[in-house]
Every structure is written in C-alpha cells, then in structure tokens.
Amino acid sequence: MNDIIVGLDIGTTKIACFVGQKDSATGKVKILGYGRAESVGVERGVVRSVKNTSLTIAKVVNAAADQANVDIDEVYVGIAGQHIKSMQNQGLVMIPSDHRYIEQSDIDRLIEDQHHISLPPGEVIIHVFPQTYYVDGEELSNDLDPVGVPAKELKANFHIVTANEANLLNIRESVRMAGLHIKGVVLEPIASAYAVLDDTDRMAGVALVDIGGGTTDVAIFHEGIIRHTSVLAVAGNVITNDIKEGCKLLKEQAELIKTRFGSCMPQQENENEVVSVPGIRSQPAREVSLKTLAGIIKARTETILEQVRYEITKSGYENQLIAGVVLTGGGAKLKYIKELAEYVTASSARIGIPDEHLVAQTPDEYIHPMYATGIGLVLYGIDEAERLSHKQASIEPEPQPQSEPEPVQVAEEPKTDTTEEKVVDEEKPRKKEKNKGNMFNRLAGYLDNLFRDSVDTPQE
C-alpha cells in the first residue's frame, strides 16, 4: 500500500474517508474508495467524545477499504477548530565553515529550530511554513532555492500554525481506538487548497475560504507561499440554527430546507413561493416562505463573510489577491453565495470544486465542495510522499571510486627455525594480519633473501 494514500476528514457534520492513488498515465489522482457517515462527538471541529468519534471513524474507514479492496492502517487527518492559531517568527542559523554553500541540511536545521520555540502552555506546533529567506542579510528572491547559494548565515521568516495539545490528543486517540495510525495531521484549509487551487492561483494571490459545518477556514496564498491562516468559529451550523429558531423547526428540518432551498439573495426569491415542512405528531404542516428563508441565510452568511474580509485585511494582502476568493466546503453550495462574497469582500469570487486534480472518470458523487478537505488530504499525502522521495534521492551520497588498498608493511625477525614469527603493525585489521602471516610462511623458504627487510602485502 506504499503508493495508496488515505485522507480522513473529521468534520462537525460528517466524517469522510477517501482512498486515492496517483494515476501514472495522467499524473492525476484516482479515488479508489470512499466512506461517509454523520459525525457524532465533534463540535465546531473539536473532538468531544473520543469513543463516539472512533466508532464513526472505524465505520467510514472500513467502508472505504472495502470499496477500494485494500487494507488501511494509516491515514492523513485534517484538523480545524477555534483553538487553531497562527504566528510569525524569524529564525537564523550560521552556515558551517566546511560548507562551500548552503546545503539542504542547513535549511532542515533552520526549520527544525522553529519546532523548539517557546509557546503558551498547552499549545503544540502542527505546521512550519518558510516564507522569505535572507542570505547574509539580503532578501532572497522567492523563486530562488537557497540550496547552492554561498553564505555565512541563513535567516528566514516563518508562518507557524499551532493547535491545542488536548484537542490534538483527542484526535489521535480517536484514530488509535479505530485501529489506525496517523501518518500526518494537516490544517484543513491547507488540505482543501490542494483540492481546489493550482499553482497559478497560489502565485497570483488567492484567499481560500472553506465554509464547513462547524468552522470557516481561511488560507491566503501569494507568490506560491502561504501567508496567512485562520479558523473562524462560525459556519454552516450557525446558519442552520438561525433557521431552526426563526422558522420554529427541528434542527434536521432546518438543515434540510437550507441545503435544498437555501439562498443568499432574498430579492431573487418570490414572496409567494413556500416550502411545506411536516408538523410534529398531530400538528399541521408548517409553511416557510423562500424569501423569508433567504433573508435569514443572508444575514448570517454576510456576518461570516465580513469576518473573512477582516482576516484578509489583517493579512496585509487584500490588494494582492489577483485570483480573488475561492469558496469551498458544504456552505459554498448555497445559492448566490458567490455574488454575496464578491459584494462583501470587494473581490472576485468563484466556487472551488475538487475535480481538476482528479481523473476524468471520477464519480460525480465526489465532485462536491464539501469533499474538498477529504480529497485534499489524499493529494497532500501524495505530494508529501513525492517530496520525501526527491529529498532522500538528493541527499544520498554519490558512489565513490574504490581506492587501492594501502600496502601493509610486515617486519621480519631473524629466523630461529623453519617457522618464522612476524611482527605486524597492531593498528592494521586483524584479518589482514592473519592473511599476511600465512602468505609469508609459504614464501619465506625461497624468498628470504629478497624480502629480508619487509614484505609488500599482496592484494586480496
């Protein structure tokens, strides 16, 4: 299963598992198996009930494994929640005097140092993203690899993402109880970006906005580098709750009419159009105006997008997002959300669908914004495996030509009988000492005059 990657999206409303493999012919990814179930025990991206979450994980992973006809023992897991934080930090290392130029080991050392910075109690680092490198005090162009550049010191700015240790442990324990090992923990907007963005988006500047069930995740890229990340504690479940309260419905009913009839533009809805919701027990059916429904959805969605705009402004890249805003996640399927996002963020927007990195035969069932994180985890895992493979290949030492063995000088003492003792340099290997002694005994009888002072050791 070396070339098969498994992504596990532990969301607030659903837990989904995708099994994927890179197609050698097209270079794209083929989804081999899929499993999905309603999430139990997760609130706003945080695992609250380890037992319930582990049972659901086991269920969806087994379904995906059966469909793909593979055994699954390790997964890439997405992480989100309001406990996710980010910070900027700067690091510096001196280049050893025996390095003629910067080597990969120097960069690895600089990045590793970031994992040991001081953090508030209870927080752990999950990602370290290099942003800008400085060689001997001068900024290095983003398109230039520091490896191979002569330098005495290397400095870099880093974007560091942290998580609450207890929440991370709950995820790990849930996966472990399901009989699985975590291959990697990935911030969910980073995973989603792999599914719905390409290199052009990242270079031009783009804000990825993943509106999930419990959190809205934001990731901002510019010149191919991740510049800002944030997790907001408002998302689809808040919209559902507003509908539930405003229309006096059950939560399941509110979620159903949101996904089927929800709109972000009340002015586009006919006031006379209504949806009938069954009453509870003997109560009559309740009619909900689509215009009223859209008004409730618009008010909350606008609040979410205003917080997104604040994060974009805080990043300092609001005027550099040529590719605009990309909306993904289950909330991105709301009607007219693209137009509302353009109005609130004052930027172009589009819906991010996880299809461009998948093979053409991918079932339509998977081509949905809600699966951006799960499919993105598979793409992330494939990319990481390739990066590690290339890195290992680059650091393997080149085969060195074998040199001729250095002759071992064997001193001869005067003969006292037919068997002669040899004094061998004690620093030479014992194996060579034995071989040289035996050979000398065989030659001593008739080469004594020629090798009175020393004997060159023959090659083995």
Image (tube, rainbow, N blue to C red):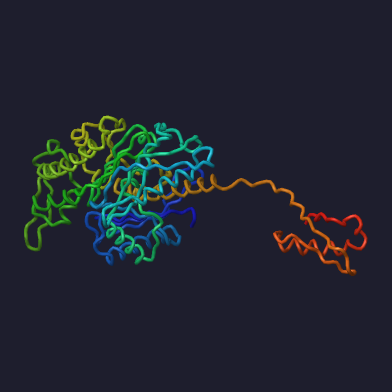
Q: Is residue 367 visible?
A: no
The mark tally for this picture is: 0
Q: Position of residue 233 (x, y in %)?
A: 20, 49
Among the 4 quarters of the image, the one containing residue 300: top left
Q: Position of residue 430 (x, y in %)?
A: 72, 63
Image position of 118 with respect to 173: above or below: above
Image quadrant in which the C terminus is located: bottom right
Find residue 355 and report its horizontal and vertical position in percent.
37, 43
The residue depicted at 47 percent of the width and 36 percent of the height is: 151
Q: Is residue 12 left or right of residue 224?
A: left
Q: What percent of the width, then of the height, locates residue 60?
A: 34, 60
Q: Residue 144 versus residue 223: which sits nearer the camera?
A: 144
Return the residue nearer the eye: 301 or 246.
Answer: 301
* Res 414 → quadrant: bottom right
Q: Left or right of 237: which side holds 135?
A: right
Q: Is residue 253 visible?
A: yes
- Report the front residue among 307 and 283: 307
Residue beneath the point at 43% across and 35% down: 135
Up-down relation of residue 138 to residue 446 (above or below): above
At x 29% / y 41%, what residue is drawn? 228
- Residue at left offset 35%, top offset 47%: 191
Left or right side of 259 for 401 = right
Furthest toward the left, the residue is: 283
Left or right, 4 with respect to 377, comes to right
